[in-house]
Amino acid sequence: MSNNKSSCNLQLPEIEKLPTDSETLASDFERYLTRHLGRFFGCVPHYLYEALSLTLRDRIISDWRTTWKDYEKEGRRRAYYMSLEFLIGRSLGNHILNLGIESETKTAMNKFALQLEEIISEEHDAGLGNGGLGRLAACFMDSCATMRLPVIGYGIRYEYGMFSQKIIDGYQVEEADHWLRDNNPWELERPEYTQVIKFGGHIEWVTNHNRKPHIVWKDTSDILAIPYDVPISGYKNNTVNTLRLWKASATNAFSLEDFNAGSYSEAVEAKNDAEHISMVLYPNDASENGKELRLKQQYFLASASLQDIFRMWKNNENGDLAHFAQQNVFQLNDTHPTIAVAELMRILIDEKYMSWNDAWNITTHTMAYTNHTLLPEALEKWPVALFEKILPRLMQIIYEINARFLDQVSKKWPGHTDRQIRMSIIEEGDVRYVRMAYLAIVGSFSVNGVAALHSKLLVEGLFKDFYELWPEKFNNKTNGVTPRRWVAYSNPLMSALITEKIGDEWVRKYENIKELKKYVDDKEFVEQWAEVKTENKKKLAELVKEECDVDFDVNSIFDVQVKRIHEYKRQLLNVLHVIHLYDRIKRGDVENWTNRCVLIGGKAAPGYRLAKLIIKLINNVADVINNDEEIGNKLKLAFMPNYGVSKMEVICPGTDLSEQVSTAGKEASGTGNMKFMMNGAVTIGTYDGANIEILDAVGEDNFFLFGLKADEVTARRANYNPEELVAQDEDLKRVMHLLTCGHFNAYEKFIFDDIIASLMNPYDPWLTLADFRSYINAQEKVSQAYRDRPLWLKMSINNTVCSGHFSTDRTMQEYNQDIWKLNN
Ligand code: 26Q
């Protein structure tokens, strides 16, 4: 298909909105099922989902068309959220909520004796992300649409999303997630906007039309980027924004050449190679660092998106770049799309014939970078040799950016060569690397962390030198989560109760949730709150039964830790507490006991050996506890397989206690903590990431704080002695004994030795045992508080009441006010 159908959607008339009454919904649904999909009632339920999705999509499309047209009419500046990950989860239920047609849709389905919830649960999660960073991007998209902010998301349409996790014999087993196999009704292919992406080749100097020397990037292997648009509906505001995901495909010319030469199979092979680029989402895995295909993905996304933006610019502004920086801003979701800095320079210089200075001026006024990690080992770097091979022109541009930057550094700090070496975008050594975070900082006008502590630690630590050079670039934007998905949609019972008391404005204006404060002591309300929690706990218990075959009793405290498995997140600390409770029951120390059901879930990166072993330990401990009659309902432990967005929608409404126990100074923000808080869970947590702001909001009486603070962690490393800690603490000694004597691996000798060694290591970076005592004491306070039912309910309500700050509407408002400025 040709590439030059300019702005065809601007010339077409508006399309009429379709009615949303239950009769029309029902008849459209029936028509889609029978005439479009060729299925009938009683078919595989997936087709019911597909038919209903198509029915809904029809009701979104007219607003989708007008939204962008309206933004253009208003002459609005635009933001582009560039991210290798968008962890969307399911869409059908979310669109129904946003259109405000839940009861109509339910009635329509009931006409065919179908249950809406069952149809909704047929949808395969769009798992195009690893965890927090990817889900954050999805929550941002929701808030931008709801706030009518002209923001386009740019990402990759991975054929395979985050792997699906099976537990076999207690071990994690990864399975491919072929989420697109059964069609995705939420995407619209736009081949007319295909872009060509260059790889490999070499650089040549030529004389251009003005007789000036000019660089061309020649003999490249080209790949096509085909966009698929996903609608992002706003909440009841007739607004539909776009998430544009790129799929890689072979160029026609490429395959044709080989075909003409008589090598049909080579042509098909080349097509295959090209399509690999968008084949699979990389898990967040140290062993995956430096992989060529990952670098190709990053450039593929950056180049396709930037070219797409220039295509739109050309259509609407006749290509005049004078005010490009006034009208456009790019937000880089971590360093993953940071090659965009160099790619924008390449396009402006090589294709738009701009001078270096003019191009740099545009770049450094349009790029903004968000950092999501404090772990130095997680900062992305690429071997220069790899860069040179795959992206020779981009490498050249990076050298030039670095040379000019180091010149600036040497002017500010003459003679400080050590500082130049430290700050260089190129890391020198036997193997030379490109430091992507430094490229992002140098190329951006804004650099932000994702929670107050994180942003502070960044400028004091990892990015200190850069802060001294450009303090004005650095700022904080505390994360959030969307209250539409995480309260209104996931927790309908609680939502109805809230709405009954304070009206429904809170869904759009989440800060209104504080109006619920006047009901914390209202007996009737508190009782209703308790009933809602119990209902939600029943649903969670059903899920646990179904997925883990463990019986959770709703009268117990539901204690939950769900997130990626990583040593710094300290799932081990949680397990040590569970073993301690088990030990107490076994030795008869059960006076004033509070029954507890502990749920842990999360995926380990496939190459992260110790994280996978932690999963095995959890499952083994669970087996021993759950099969011991003496333990009974006093204690249960379950590992939830394949944790993801749609699991969390059931988990967070049913949780009493939210575990946020990372080593202080290591969790950039956390966002699960916010979902739990909104749903009336109380947090037990360290002074880390956004926990600190949660504690600030809710107050010490409604939060179980424990453990070393970030500066104490640093100080403690020098005199950390796990052996001494074990010797001095009778409870810890008994717990460690149960582990070392093989109580949980009687038939699998020594398998947990590496875990034990990591806990006993005086250089354990996560200082797990240093926080043991303080954690156990805090957990005992939790147990006592839970037994005081009115007290616990009050804490629960207070958490929801004080969660107003953690909506992504607030986060987006801050990005817009300080960085994007999209209201002109
Ligand atoms: C890197 C190299 C190769 C392949 C993959 C990756 C990779 C992929 C994903 C590296 C990191 C990620 C994801 C990181 C992430 O989710 N970070 C979390 O971001 C949240 C949103 O800001 C924070 O709340 C969490 O604290 C942070 O851990």
Image (spheres, rainbow, N blue to C red):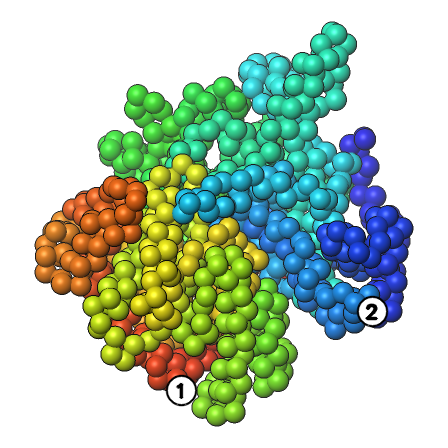
When the figure is inspected, residue 594 is found, relative to residue 381, above or below; the finding is below
Residue 197 location in percent, x, y? Answer: 63, 28
**Numbered label attached to residue 111:** 2
Q: Is residue 501 visible?
A: yes
Q: Residues within 10 Å of mark 1 (few under 14, many from 20)?
A: some
Amino acid type at mark 2: Lys
Q: Label 1 belongs to which residue? A: 790
Q: Is residue 344 visible?
A: no
When the figure is inspected, residue 214 is found, relative to residue 663, above or below; the finding is above
Mark 2: secondary structure: loop
Decide: marks 1, 2 in contact (CB < 8 A)? no
- Using the numbered discs, state the Cα–Cα distance from disc 1 to disc 2 in whole angstroms: 43 Å
Residue 81 location in percent, x, y? Answer: 58, 48
**Along the line of sight, which residue is nearer the eye, 483 or 34?**
34
Mark 1: secondary structure: helix
Amino acid type at mark 1: Pro
Residue 95 location in percent, x, y? Answer: 70, 61
**Along the line of sight, which residue is nearer the eye, 96 or 425?**
96
Residue located 80% across and 33% down the image: 4
**Along the line of sight, which residue is nearer the eye, 612 or 634?**
634
Using the rendered view, name the quadrant where residue 791 is placed: bottom left
Query: Is residue 98 shown left or right of residue 407?
Result: right
Residue located 50% across and 38% down the image: 282
Discs 1/2, front = 2
Q: Quadrant of the C terminus?
A: bottom right
Residue 488 location in percent, x, y? Answer: 60, 70
The mark tally for this picture is: 2
Q: Residue furthest top?
A: 261
Residue located 30% across and 44% down the image: 747
